[in-house]
Image (cartoon, grey):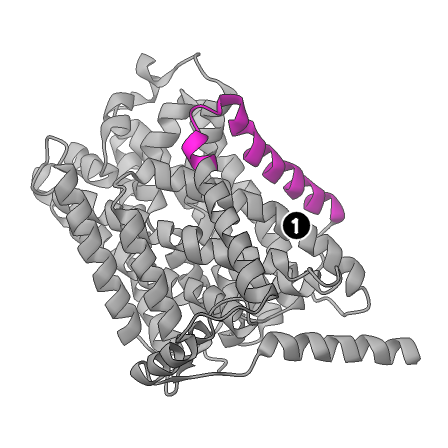
Amino acid sequence: KKEVGLFSSITFLLGCIIGTGIFVSPGTVLKNAGSVEIALLVWTAAGLNSLIGAFCFVELGALLPASGGDYAYFSAAGKALGTYGDFPAFLYAWSCMAMLDPTSISVEGLTFSAYVLSLLYPECTPPSGATVLIALLYVNTTANSSQLLFSVSISARVQDIFSGLKCTLLLVIIMTGTLYSFKVNHIKDPSYSSSNISPGDVAAAFYGAAYTYSGWRAVNNIAEEVKNPARNIPLAVFASVVITTAAYLLTNLAFFIAMDADTIIASDAIAVTFIRSTWGPSLSVLVPLIISLSLFGSTCAEIFVSARITFAAARQGHLASFLSYIHVNTAVPMASIITRCVLSLLYTMTGSVTFLIEACVLFETTWDIASVVALLILRRSMSKTTRTIRVPTFLVFLRLVICIAMATVPLSQVHRYRYHYIAVLVTCLSGIIYYVAFVRLKMRLPGGDAASVIMQKCLNSAACVNELDLILRHRSESEASLIRD
């Protein structure tokens, strides 16, 4: 159903972007950047990179407005590559299900835990066991809430509220920093300058900043529910990325003005530390509540969106069929949501926000390279199709160069990133094994069909129409008609 308009698309996307990142990454970015100037450049560069990526993504979304985002684009591009052209699409869906999506929920859970525990441990680091336990409870609660928020329209309205709440908090931080600058300005402190910076450090800083923008893909993932997608998707992505970049720069400036570098780097709950430093301990109690509610909204939105990638892949026959079933009354992919949240619980037990962020961004960057290549392939294979937007070619290749650099620069410090690369390789290798066994060789587990039926009945779900195939068939027939004419 076309239930999501332009305003709701913008607020939904802002809700997905302005989530965990800005409340956890500033310290990591500053620590690795080594100075205020480089840190602000990193935040700006990450915003520009996201904007270029968003433009490329918008062209793909307008060309193929089907749920699944990158998965749908890889599927369409793969059809031009022959028999095994579906492998990139499968591997992307597998990566999202097995690592990318669950880790983002885990990061939000651990961030939620850090802010809640800041009330009990205002002057010291909370116990790691308590942090993980609260994060696990958070992931479980958001999973259940996402299943209760069945309707697309209800979920979008909830996002409108939480997006406004997060933007209000950022506005308060920015205004406070502006007023505080007349009293104290820590930007000029010597602690804000360091000359011992390596390419690996800059990459780590960029990873931390890039993670805070990663939600800009969300609108294309729910393209089937957006009204007039050819118009609303480009406008929503552009507006949300520009607003977010400006807000992040001003928020970081407020942090730099009010707090010294050591305080920012050491803080796990930087917004609480900021309010405590400027407004005092009494008002700082409100911040964990506001951020907790904001994170709740962001997590529900992410679960709502990203479950559709698993759903789209299962609908194409790349994953277990029961993952493609949707609720008969509300059209929500229940099985996909449950699967993602079970994996999120496992990643949460690592307890390391920094590792999860860096591993997630490294893997996302690898797939961003494939996304740009898919765009170039579709420009050739669907050259006769009318496009409502076409990105300048030099921007497409600039995006490709940036993504390749982001994926390869960490190799200069391979010892530091060895576990990140291992996580990526293990995910890919397990996906290859699954693809060969269950997609190509059509192997079936004993009792698998019976289990699917039981799952379908328990979740009151059923199969649905494969819209991607319908779109591709329609585009192919249109191009054939143009050629005949």
456 with respect to 317 (left or right): left
Q: Point out residue 409 in the picture as x, y percentages from the top left corner.
A: 55, 28
417 versus 47 height, above or below: above
Q: Point out residue 289 in the picture as x, y percentages from the top left corner.
A: 16, 53
45 versus 107 height, above or below: above
The quarter holding residue 277 reads: top left
61 versus 405 height, above or below: below
Pointer 1 residue: 372
Task: Confirm whether residue 189 shows in the render.
Answer: no
The residue stretch that appears in magenta: 393-421
126 with respect to 214 (left or right): left
Q: Residue at x 61, y 64 (%)?
A: 440
View extreme (bottom): residue:
329
Q: Residue at x 47, y 75 (%)?
A: 321
**434 or 208, which lies in front?**
434
**371 or 419, which lies in front?**
419
User: What's the amino acid at mark 1?
Assistant: Val
Magenta region includes residue 206: no
